[in-house]
Amino acid sequence: MRKDVRILLVGEPKVGKTSLIMSLVSEEFPDVVPYRVEEITIPADVTPERVPTHIVDYSEAEQTDEQLFQEISKANVICIVYSVNNRTSMEKVTEHWIPLITENTDKDSRVPLILVGNKSDLVEHSSMETILPIMNQYSEIETCVECSAKNLKNISELFYYAQKAVLHPTGPLYCPENKQMKPLCVKALTRIFKVSDLDNDGILKDNELNFFQRACFHSPLEPQALEDVKNVVRKNLIDGVLHNGLTLKGFLFLHTLFIQRGRHETTWTVLRRFGYDDDLELNQDYLFPPLKVPPDCSTELNHNAYLFLQSVFDKHDKDRDCALSPDELRDLFDVFPYTPWGPDVNNTVCTNEQGWITYQGFLSQWTLTTYLDVQRCLEYFGYLGYSIVAEQESQAAGITVTRAKKIDLQKKQTQRNVFRCNVFGAVGSGKSGFLQAFLGRNLLRQNMMKEEHRSFYAISTTFVYGQEKYLLLHEVFPDLDYLTDADMGCDVVCLLYDVSNACSLEYCAKVFKQYFMDSKTPCMMVAAKSDLPEVKQTYGCSPLEFCRKHKMPPPQSFTCNTAAAPDREIYTKLTTMAMYPHARLRCMCTCNRCTFCLCQNLLNSELLQSIRAKLYAVVLRRHIIQEDLSSATFWLRASVGATVFAVLGVALFRALLKTR
Ligand code: GDP
Ligand code: MG
């Protein structure tokens, strides 16, 4: 919103400019008036729109033309005052004042004008007949008002209109010539309608209207007011109300009516609430709220954001097939100024047989955007109206910034839900196949993919010890000269060689030795194309020897040349390694059935974690505050219990590891 409003009064001498200002301030008509009063500032809290307002007088007798021009260029709104009992002063409005103002203001940002007919106490008739044609001729005239400084008629109204002309200009909204809203305004209101139409049936029902009303005006409509609104639309439009709800046509009509009746602040309130600025563009503060992401931290969507995305998906999956058809997706992106997703997205996330993005795929793509480019995610959330629909402070409320990875490593625990795995491998070793297989696509299906639609990312979910996690695979371009920081920074590394290509291990060995040998990032060797006959690698040692030497798990065989969807177990293993980089897991099992897995599940279960956390907290507190003896013995017992519990757990875990 604006910081302040500057109102300038001009007009012929003796029309009553100074008297108007003095009447406003002192609420009585001054008998004696100077030529000109000094600029006055009305503090924000006593003005109707709550912005500081400066009122500036002009007097030909006291000021030069140069001073006048300066004031004109500084003004946000200009009141041209005439006297209703003085024809010449009225004629001068078009002959002198409007041309003078036009000459002294920018063409692009024309200052709004208000025509003020003063001394209405002196005449019986109104000057409106003369004034209306002028209003129609000059679109910069916001409004006109007749008033009297003498009997204080319409004085505060005059200044309120002036304020309103600046804060809620009609210019961007409405075209007086053809009596219609301007295209940009229609576009903005159409987006607002679509966002507010929560079930996407093209009608704003009572609950949606009430939601909209609450979002914009902080209070729902009275049932009677709701009916009145609909009746007004019904009376004027055949298809403005349908099934007792407001159609888009009806919604637009209603706003045209507001504007035509001088209530355009209503329309502005709505537009601003949905993020629009004075030029009817979505403003930057709305699209890009501040969000600090310190180094070593990642960005994820929180529960609330996923709920919102779920509702967005449901709203557009009209045929309820749990996938978005191209038409449904187009409809979803209707509230965007451009189409955000290209065809590569269909090769980044899970799709159904028709190649349409599934519910899982939809959430995955949003997770990916949030992880890789959180600013973009905020922007998209802005278009979808997240902060409004989910009733949040800003788009940033949907984002969790994780703690630094360094701390995760120190604490040997992570709260992250998205893990990044960079996939390295020589040209043609099967990286893309490995990524696509994660999306459930076998070689046959992969061969149908268009080369120009390929993606270097694949994201989906895996279950690690009963918890659902996102694994983000990134295929790294195999030219080592072009590696970026993002190519190195990941939670787990996948080194992939082709069992049928004798030279392919060499690249993996090189990458490992050059970048990951001394890093803490866990690495896994994948023996791709395992359906093909294996050849001896030209590299100095065998893949298995290489892994042993460098304390990596043995090479994992993998093929996507399967009849059904390729095996997913390897992705669960990668996620497990990403989550527990410390655990030198000899057992790579993630079956979720064997004793090892059950034990892991138990140790990681939330119940146990919370019991442990509570006990630790208690023990810690016990050390700080010396409590009385009786409670101390109790806590002592509790802490001993916790220790025994923990020791037993670890022993059990170790024993199981050994037996495998
Ligand atoms: P300015 O030169 O435009 O600033 O005009 P002034 O404020 O000095 O007013 C000129 C004369 O008109 C003064 O004698 C005022 O008393 C008188 N006047 C101003 N406003 C009104 C009004 O509303 N009604 C009547 N009857 N006289 C007014
Ligand atoms: Mg004066």
Image (tube, rainbow, N blue to C red):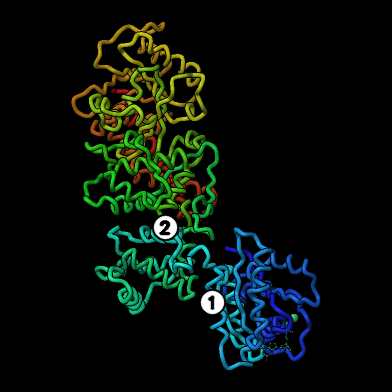
The one of 102 and 28 positioned closer to us in this rendering: 102
Marks 2 and 1, the one that precedes in the sequence: 1
Disc 2 to disc 1, C-alpha distance: 31 Å
Count neighbours of disc 2 (C-alpha within 10 A) and say few if under 14, some if 14 to 19, many if 20 or more.
some
In the rendered view, does 79 fall on the left or right side of 225?
right
Residue 566 visible here = no
Against 455, residue 258 (above or below) is below
Side of 368 where 21 appears, left or right: right
The label on residue 133 is: 1
> Element type at marker 1?
helix
The quadrant of the rendering that contains the C terminus is: top left
Judging depth in this view, the residue of 360 and 651 nearest the camera is 360
Residue 187's label in the rendered image is 2
> Which residue is more in the foreground, 330 or 660?
330
Q: Which image quadrant: the N terminus?
A: bottom right
Tell which tag, 2 or 1, sits nearer the viewer: 1
Q: Is residue 29 visible?
A: yes
Q: Residue 13 location, x and y as percent? A: 74, 81
Question: Disc 1 beta carbon < 8 A from ligand 1?
Answer: no
**121 up-or-down from 606: above or below:** below
* Callout 2 secondary element: helix
| Amino acid marked by disc 2 | Lys
Q: Which mark is residue 292?
A: none
| Position in image of residue 100 (x %, y %) | 68, 68
Q: Tell me where residue 22 sits by quadrant.
A: bottom right
Q: Is residue 446 left or right of residue 220?
A: left
